[in-house]
């Protein structure tokens, strides 16, 4: 979108009236987690947040773990809530929250979209009739595509030439080979249906075709490349839950089962320290790994809650063969894979060849003992078998990674609340003997001060495939750390969040060829002078060690990275919503100093039945280390946080139209124009490269409610 078009939208915005019928989930997630990083699975976080939004928590039937999972209430507020329930009985209205100690209007407004006090009467109608008449259901379709043709879709690709040489390096022959080409179209297709009723059932399926993947019903292809489905029944057949299809688990502190809404270190410096046991839940994301596929059941027996599950999931892997001798006399062939591929892309012949080549069979159980709301003691176990052994390609840093076709891991966890303190911990051991342990506390020291503390240790040979505990690495392996977090809120207008994290890596890492350490801190000040204006300023500094080449010897060198953010949100009385953000970063690594900056202006407004969301952003980032990650408004149930790299202008405009009561349409156009490039420049990498200086995308979505 050209700047003149953007200015036009800014002008007509003053005639519009803004309305918010639904919570802006992107805005909610951004407010809680303001540290953007390429290692965080934001789609998974967003999907978990969406489930909380669509299946509202019944405040009269909830527990501390479920309330904590929203990351809105402090531990002191949760204690005050349950003390109020024990003293006064069940809530009659959401408005009653105003009478609870430590609850202010801002907190109530933040939690309201995710909770209710509605008591659902027992519905004795047949199951299929309940499904057909359920109000909480939707069907949506989404289409998106890049407007520029990418290299992998061109009809004539450049040919690579390979030279065959003899032992004296003399060329004796040449071989020409065309590089791989995407088999499918450049379009991305996505669809989802879900109907659910809290405490009764959830039924849904999701299907997706990524750009470059084929869409056809032949040759073993069943239309879309990926399907996900689930059926969850609650309080049926004498069981609390029965789930068939795709599901996930969140138990303890995430050492074994770490699915759900947990983003790690961020602007939510206290509540994010502690994970919460939510048990088994449906999986509805389009990420093609990190979930279970099979059957799971949960049952309460007195003070005990027992969950059992079985999963048989096909994974991607490139099967290789090697020769070995079992008795030192005869060589035998053995198949293996170097790693499980988790991208979910099946665009080229090579990617299709590794699809579903490894069968992952899992069986597991959890037992929770809850004599009261203050104490929980649990044990968990997971046994995993692979049809083909995993065998890492050996190098210096991966000597202690998992190898083989069988792994098991077991853990015990505990959480205990005492006055305004909540203590928690979990310890686990994998088949290798590696230990993972995490423990700490969160506390409300006063109505205005909250604090969190965490110790963690993950051995270099600790193998957990579905864990997601708090860590500096993207996985819970080869790390020790100490984390302090604090939040000070003297009144509703001012808030200060801070954390300090000290970490060490006892063994080698990728790009770090020796044991190393580092530390990180974040400070964020938020000021809300009124309901219409909100601003914050944030600084984060991270110091880590990486290996650098020094003549013929690699040595550790300190890398210092700083991030700065200043943001202002303001709503004009005319209904115009404006958002201004400036964020920058610097990376200091010895003689190398690089930087990046992004200046962002959002303008959101409404004209009649059309809702407009627009942005203009200027960015200048020297390299990938200074990529500026910025949230963007996207179509419903989609999440966008692109990395601004290089120098250029990023614009988008999105329009939402509700022609009928149960029908909504979205159209989104985004465009990035890079400077310091020419019309013959290549943007992107590998087969995703495009010719020119622009990258643009169109996205269309329709949602239907019944």
Image (spheres, grey):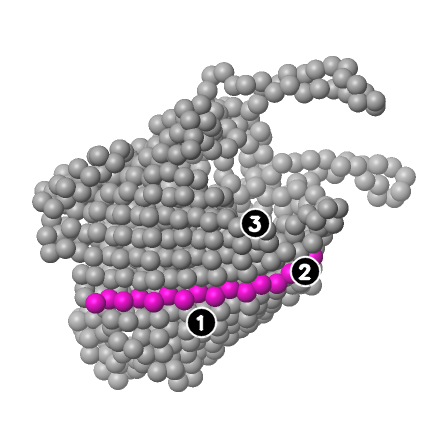
Picture coordinates of residue 262, whole percent (x, y): 43, 60
User: Residue 485, which numbered label?
Assistant: 1
Q: Tags 2 and 1 in contact by the CB under 8 Å rule?
A: no
Q: Residue at x 20, y 57 (%)?
A: 570
Residue extent of the magenta highlight = 514-529
Residue for badge 3: 592
Mark 2 secondary-structure assignment: loop
- Position in image of residue 300 (x %, y %): 43, 69
- The residues bearing labels 2 and 3 have C-alpha atoms spaced at a distance of 23 Å
Q: Position of residue 442 (x, y in %)?
A: 43, 75
Pair 1/3: label in front:
3
Which mark is on residue 678? none
193 and 272: which is toward the camera: 272
Say which mark, if any, is on residue 515.
2
Asked whether, in this view, residue 578 is left or right of residue 180, the answer is left
Secondary structure beneath dot 1 equals: strand
573 vs 158, left or right, is left
Q: Residue at x 37, y 44 (%)?
A: 619
Which quarter of the rendering shows the C terminus? top left
């Amino acid at each position: 979108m050209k700047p003149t078009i953007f200015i036009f939208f800014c002008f007509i915005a003053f005639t519009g009236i803004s309305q918010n019928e639904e919570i802006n989930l992107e805005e909610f997630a951004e407010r809680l987690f303001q540290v953007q990083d390429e290692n965080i699975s934001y789609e998974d976080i967003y999907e978990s947040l969406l489930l909380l939004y669509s299946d509202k928590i019944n405040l009269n039937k909830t527990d501390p773990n479920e309330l904590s999972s929203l990351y809105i209430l402090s531990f002191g507020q949760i204690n005050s809530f349950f003390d109020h329930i024990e003293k006064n009985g069940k809530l009659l209205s959401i408005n009653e929250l105003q009478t609870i100690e430590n609850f202010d209007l801002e907190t109530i407004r933040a939690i309201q979209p995710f909770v209710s006090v509605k008591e659902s009467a027992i519905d004795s109608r047949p199951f299929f009739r309940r499904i057909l008449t359920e109000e909480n259901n939707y069907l949506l379709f989404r289409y998106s595509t890049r407007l520029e043709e990418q290299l992998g879709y061109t009809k004539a690709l450049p040919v690579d030439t390979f030279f065959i040489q003899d032992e004296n390096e003399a060329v004796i022959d040449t071989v020409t080979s065309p590089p791989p080409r995407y088999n499918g179209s450049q379009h991305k297709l996505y669809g989802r249906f879900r109907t659910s009723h809290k405490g009764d059932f959830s039924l849904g399926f999701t299907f997706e075709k990524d750009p470059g993947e084929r869409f056809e019903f032949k040759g073993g292809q069943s239309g879309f490349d990926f399907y996900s489905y689930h059926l969850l029944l609650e309080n049926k057949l004498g069981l609390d839950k029965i789930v068939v299809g795709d599901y996930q688990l969140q138990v303890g502190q995430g050492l074994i089962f770490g699915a759900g809404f947990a983003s790690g270190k961020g602007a939510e410096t206290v509540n994010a320290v502690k994970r919460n046991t939510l048990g088994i839940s449906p999986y509805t994301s389009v990420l093609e790994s990190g979930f279970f596929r099979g059957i799971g059941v949960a049952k309460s027996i007195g003070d005990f809650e027992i969950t059992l599950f079985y999963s048989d999931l096909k994974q991607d892997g490139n099967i290789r063969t090697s020769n070995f001798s079992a008795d030192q006399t005869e060589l035998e062939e053995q198949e293996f894979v170097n790693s499980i591929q988790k991208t979910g892309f099946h665009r080229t012949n090579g990617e299709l060849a590794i699809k579903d080549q490894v069968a992952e069979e899992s069986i597991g159980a959890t037992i929770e003992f809850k004599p009261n709301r203050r104490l929980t003691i649990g044990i968990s176990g997971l046994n995993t078998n692979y049809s083909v052994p995993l065998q890492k390609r050996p190098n210096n840093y991966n000597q202690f990674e998992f190898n083989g076709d069988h792994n098991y891991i077991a853990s015990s966890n505990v959480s205990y609340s005492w006055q305004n303190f909540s203590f928690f911990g979990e310890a686990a051991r994998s088949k290798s003997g590696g230990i993972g342990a995490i423990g700490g506390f969160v506390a409300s020291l006063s109505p205005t001060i909250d604090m969190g503390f965490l110790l963690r240790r993950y051995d270099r040979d600790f193998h957990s495939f579905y864990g997601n505990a708090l860590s500096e690495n993207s996985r819970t392996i080869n790390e020790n750390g100490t984390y302090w977090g604090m939040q000070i809120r003297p009144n509703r207008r001012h808030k200060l969040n801070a954390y300090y994290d000290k970490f060490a890596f006892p063994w080698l890492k990728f790009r770090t060829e020796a044991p190393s350490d580092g530390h990180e801190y974040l400070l964020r000040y938020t000021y809300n002078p009124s309901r219409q204006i909100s601003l914050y300023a944030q600084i984060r500094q991270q110091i880590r060690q990486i290996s650098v080449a020094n003549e013929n010897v690699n040595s550790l060198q300190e890398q210092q990275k700083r991030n700065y953010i200043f943001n202002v949100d303001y709503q004009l009385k005319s209904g115009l919503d404006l958002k201004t953000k400036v964020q920058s970063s610097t990376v200091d690594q010895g003689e190398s100093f690089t930087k990046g900056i992004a200046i962002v202006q959002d303008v959101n407004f409404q004209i009649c039945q059309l809702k407009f969301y627009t942005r203009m952003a200027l960015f200048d980032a020297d390299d990938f280390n200074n990529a500026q990650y910025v949230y963007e408004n996207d179509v419903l149930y989609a999440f966008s946080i692109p990395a601004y790299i290089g120098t250029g202008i990023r614009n988008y405009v999105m329009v939402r139209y509700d022609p009928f009561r149960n029908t909504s349409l979205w159209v989104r156009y985004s465009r990035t124009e890079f400077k310091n490039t020419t019309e013959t420049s290549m943007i992107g990498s590998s087969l995703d490269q495009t010719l020119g200086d622009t990258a643009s995308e169109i996205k269309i979505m329709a949602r239907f409610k019944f």
